Amino acid sequence: MRYFSAIEMAKIWAISVRSVRNYCTQGRVDGAFLAGKTWQIPEDAKKPERLNKKKMEEITLLDILKEQKVSKYSGGIYHKTQINLTYNSNHIEGSCLSHDQTRYIFETNTIGLENEVLNVDDILETANHFRCIDMIIDHAKDVLSEKFIKELHFVLKNGTSDSRKEWFVVGDYKKIPNEVGGMNTTLPEEVAQRMKELLKEYNDKKEKSFEDILDFHVKFERIHPFQDGNGRVGRLILFKECLKYNIVPFIIDGHLKMFYYRGLKEWDYEKGYLIDTCLSAQDKYKADLDYFRIAYENNKSN
């Protein structure tokens, strides 16, 4: 099959090159893919139907992520989000897989080994985290619930060595007290009630601001409802809720790890530490959106 560039296809379809690129970025051209920085479009690709201006304005990041997920589109914002969010969130928690290894698992569903020993749990939790991201995209508009949070944990930890421990409950709240960063967390017998109270407080707010979502995250991490996996589940929830309220989401990377931890610890006294850290991470994600020519509202984080 022959493939055409965006410039060539623009002449065939009698539209602007920018429109062709936008259609490809949005996952609306079947079979189109990026080769380096150049779009390759099948010769028999159908020109997408033009959306009216009002409908175009309503296309959100969540819409694009859903489209690219369903179409298995490679090289777009969905692809990049899967790899970067999974790598960074797992890396914060001690995963030894590299960014390239994470990408390889996502793109090929295989593991490339060359005189290297990898932790099986790191591999399983990477594959599981990809599924968790699909879950938060599919259910982004749903009301946040205990059931969904437990399902995220179940998918994340399923099949790992933790799941074979008698005292570790996959997909349910912890049985043994734990701590985070040297600080005590909610006792096991109090977790269910505290989670119900936190979700009621959060869901009773009709509109959620950036600060509201961060406040939920801080309180969730302080409860630390699961035996392990709380940080990753918490950051998945952050991403989901940003998508729900059309707030630009963000990914905490290794460079921001210590600032992120400081922000969680100091939230009650100085919210600016965590807010500024997350806004810095948000700026990085905005740069990805700019690259893929995906529109967003700058004032949504305030």
Image (cartoon, rainbow, N blue to C red):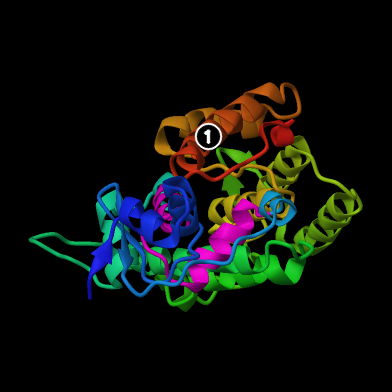
Quadrant of image for the N terminus: bottom left
Q: Residue furthest left?
A: 115
Type of amino acid under label 1? Ala
Let me know if residue 142 appears in the view.
yes
Q: Provide residue 179's location: percent of width, then percent of height.
A: 60, 47
Front one among 201 and 179 = 201
Quadrant of image for the C terminus: top right
Q: Residue at x 60, y 61 (%)?
A: 50
Front one among 107 and 52 = 52
Q: Provide residue 180's location: percent of width, then percent of height.
A: 58, 44
Q: Residue at x 70, y 48 (%)?
A: 246
Q: Provide residue 116's location: percent of width, then percent of height.
A: 13, 59
Residue position for label 1: 281
Asked if residue 193 lies left or right of residue 110, the reply is: right
Front one among 59 and 214 = 59
Please determine whether, in this image, residue 34 is positioned above or below residue 148: above
Q: Provide residue 170's location: percent of width, then percent of height.
A: 57, 73
Start-end of magenta stretch: 59-88
**The stretch drawn in magenta includes residue 185:** no
Secondary structure beneath disc 1? helix
Q: Residue at x 59, y 42 (%)?
A: 295
Asked if residue 88 lies left or right of residue 220, the reply is: left
Front one among 199 and 170 = 199
Residue 274's image quarter? top right
**The stretch drawn in magenta includes residue 82:** yes
Please determine whether, in this image, residue 88 is positioned above or below residue 300: below
Let me know if residue 98 appears in the view.
no
